Image (cartoon, helix red, strand yellow):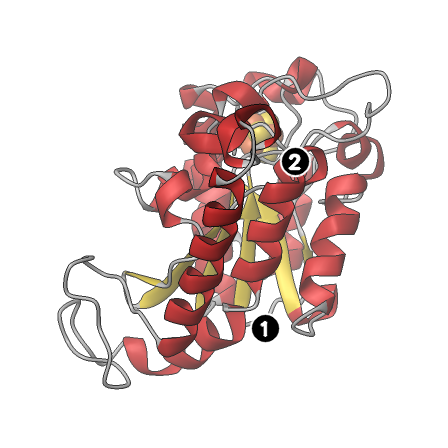
Amino acid sequence: MTTAETSSNSWHSIDELATAVRSCTACGLHSTRTNAVPGSGSSKAEILIIGEGPGFNEDQQGLPFVGRSGKLLDELLAAIPLTREDVFITNVVKCRPPDNRDPLPDEVAACRPYLERQMELTDPKVVVTLGRVSMLRFHPKGKISEDHGKILEWEGRILFPLLHPAAGLRNPAIKRELQQDVLKLPEALRQAHGVSSVNNDDEINGEVDTSAPNSLVTQQDRKLNEDKEELEQENNNRPSSQTADAPIADGQLSEPLLKNETTKEEKGDRQLGIF
Ligand code: SF4
């Protein structure tokens, strides 16, 4: 068994790292994978997108987000508009956990050097996390139901948590949240070009919500929050059985309700779990 930790300094490029990932045996996931999934996209991208782990289709093809979740992710990016060539996409763990279970702590730890080196090599301005588990990697005290779509600062970069696209596939209200949130990504990128020169409490673009540490709130945020409140109000006026928020609430945006998402109809889509 090789140790990713001890080899991380020898990965001088994204391609070298990918080669190492494909032959990695640093955790037990290597024994059940078909293909490792190092990541794809531009190594010079300013936006790094991080999911939890490969699913069935990703494991088969060795590429990230190639199932229905990936199609939705493409649609979300196109709305900005961005393509996969404008970003780099990877996962917290590079090999598929069996039965789409969550990656175990020791697996996340074993794979950590790869993600950390990818961060160094791509040096992104904005880190977009997809779902809860990925967000917690950077924002351990965060709540995905509250923090998705927020522009946060993380170690001199912008952290921009999103709900997981897989959750959007099965819940139209979550999909709408995703569609609204992703529209703030250009603003996150714009702010990222100035964030490294200010502290958490510093004012950026004249507007900082001091009630939310590390949160950079803009007029666009407020407009989207107003839209969200309108949506919530709409839902409140419906019978509870038809209310989008009733099934979503906190719990449905969090990991437990999104585990084991793979069904017969959706065998290929794993990249949910998480989030
Ligand atoms: S999940 Fe990461 S650490 Fe584990 S075998 Fe795959 S590449 Fe190596």
In this figure, which residue is indicated by the disc labeled 1?
44
Tag 1: residue type? Lys
Q: Is residue 1 visible?
A: no
Q: Is residue 275 placed above or below 19 in the rendered structure?
A: above
Q: Looking at the image, can residue 93 be seen?
A: yes
**Circle 1 sits in a helix, a strand or a loop, which is it?**
loop
| Left or right, 71 with reference to 154 | right
Residue 106 image point, x, y percent: 42, 21
| Label 1 Cα neighbours within 10 Å, binned few <14 / some 14-19 / many ≥20 | some
Picture quadrant where residue 95 is located: top right
In the image, 100 versus 249, the foreground residue is 249
Q: Residues within 10 Å of mark 2 (few under 14, many from 20)?
A: some
Determine whether label 1 and label 2 are within 8 Å by CB: no
Q: Nearer the viewer, mark 1 or mark 2?
A: 2
Count how many numbered circles sit on residues in the image: 2
Q: Amino acid at mark 2?
A: Asn
Q: Which mark is residue 171?
A: 2
Identify the residue shown where x is 52% and y is 75%: 186
Q: Position of residue 62 (x, y in %)?
A: 78, 40
| Quadrant hosting residue 152 | bottom left
Q: Secondary structure at mark 2?
A: loop
Q: Earlier in the sequence, mark 1 or mark 2?
A: 1
Quarter of the figure that contains the N terminus: top right
